[in-house]
Image: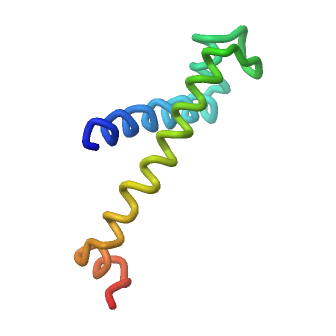
């Protein structure tokens, strides 16, 4: 499970950096590496986007429940019961 979390985190970081480049420079690194340019998709770039999205969903369901059951986290965010 730890290896899956680390892999997912790496993929999410890659996705976040790609969106940073899109937002700042209008440059889509994934499209540049695997397609004909911004706005066009190759099979490989679609796979990369799919993996990044699945990694985000994976982290959402694996890391958030851990955070919400952490009493210190709950107290720090005003959610203690």
Compared with 74, 12 (above or below) is above
Percent of width and height locating residue 35: 67, 11
Residue found at x 36% / y 56%: 63
Residue found at x 40% / y 38%: 8
- Give the camera-side residue of 55 and 75: 55
Residue found at x 62% / y 19%: 45
Compared with 63, 69 (above or below) is below
Residue found at x 46% / y 30%: 14
The quarter of the picture where the C terminus appears is bottom left
Compared with 34, 54 (above or below) is below
Percent of width and height locating residue 51: 53, 31
- Give the camera-side residue of 27 and 36: 36
Percent of width and height locating residue 65: 38, 65
When asked about the image quadrant of residue 38, the answer is top right
- Drawn side of residue 23 relative to residue 74, left or right: right
- Give the camera-side residue of 23 and 42: 42
- Give the camera-side residue of 8 and 25: 8
- Drawn side of residue 28 relative to residue 11, left or right: right
The residue most toward the bottom is: 81
């Amino acid at each position: 499970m730890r290896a899956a979390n680390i892999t997912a985190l790496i993929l999410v970081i890659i996705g976040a950096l790609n969106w940073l480049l899109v937002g700042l420079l209008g440059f889509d690194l994934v499209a540049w590496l695997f397609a004909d340019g911004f706005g066009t998709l190759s099979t490989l770039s679609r796979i990369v986007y799919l993996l990044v999205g699945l990694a985000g969903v994976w982290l959402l369901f694996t890391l958030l429940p851990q955070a919400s059951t952490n009493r210190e986290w709950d107290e720090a965010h005003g959610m203690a019961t």
